[in-house]
Amino acid sequence: MVEPGAGHTPAPTGQGFGRVLVAVYGIFALAATSRSAVQLATKFAEAPLAYLLSAFAAIVYIVATVSLARGDATSRRLATVAISIELVGVLIVGAASVLIPSVFEHPTVWTGFGSGYGFVPLVLPFVGLWWLRHTR
Amino acid sequence: MTGTYATVITVVALLFAGWALISAASNRHPTLLLFAAGVLLEALLVGFAVGGIVQMAESGRHFARAEFVGYLLGSLAIPPVAFYWASGEKSRSGTVVIALAFLITPVMVLRVQQVWAGSVG
């Protein structure tokens, strides 16, 4: 990562293609939040790990959505952190759910690399990080 | 909570989504006509939410009521938020945002029905 020179203003992350990217992140924030709300409220005891993961994913998506939409320097850093966590999360949870399926019988947004959501959760962090780089 | 009305919303939302996608593909930013489509869909969703909450109040059955109302209100929020977010965009990206909102509406309707049936996981 090369620091941009003095006087260099990065392009906003929430415009053009970023407008669509933020919308997709928003949809996943909504999906993960509502799913984990249902899970935590109705059957937390059944699978605490999976349901806490759902809630964690929800928070990551919310932070990514808001920070990409805002797009100032601080938000850009925050978005990079959130999307990196998202990438690690979907890879680890995806791999773990394939290797030890018994632990992940209850679905989360990242189970099976996001197969329940058309693998968009796997693709999204790559697109997000690319977009942050592209607009820098 | 199932049946014709939900199907109508689904079909209308998908038709509008197709329209928005074609419109975006031909490089148009959101038009007033597309906004009118959003208003119509929102009106249908308000009917769905009111009907759903009335049916819930009349039903003695046990199901996840808070989540049911949550999904109904969530589906109501989507078109206004999408049009607000698209309004600041002068390119076709705004039209794609609206297409996404129309595409996600049938999913929300489906989730409402799943919660109603008690089969949400």
Image: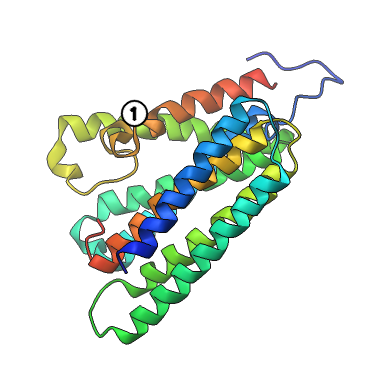
Question: Does the rendering let one see residue A60?
Answer: no
Residue B65 shown left or right of residue A126 in the figure: left
Out of B5 and A99, give the one closest to the viewer: B5
> Which residue occupies 36% across, 57% down?
B7
> Which residue occupies 60% across, 51% down?
B37
Q: Position of residue A21 (x, y in %)?
A: 57, 33
**Relative to A134, is B48 above or below?**
below
Residue A20 shown left or right of residue B112 in the figure: right
Q: Which residue is mark 1?
A: A91
Q: Quadrant of the N terminus of chain A?
A: top right
- Give the residue type at disc 1: Leu
Residue B19 shown left or right of residue B51 in the figure: right
Q: Position of residue A107 (x, y in %)?
A: 25, 46
Q: Secondary structure at mark 1?
A: helix
Q: Position of residue B97 (x, y in %)?
A: 59, 40
Question: Does the rendering let one see residue B72?
Answer: yes
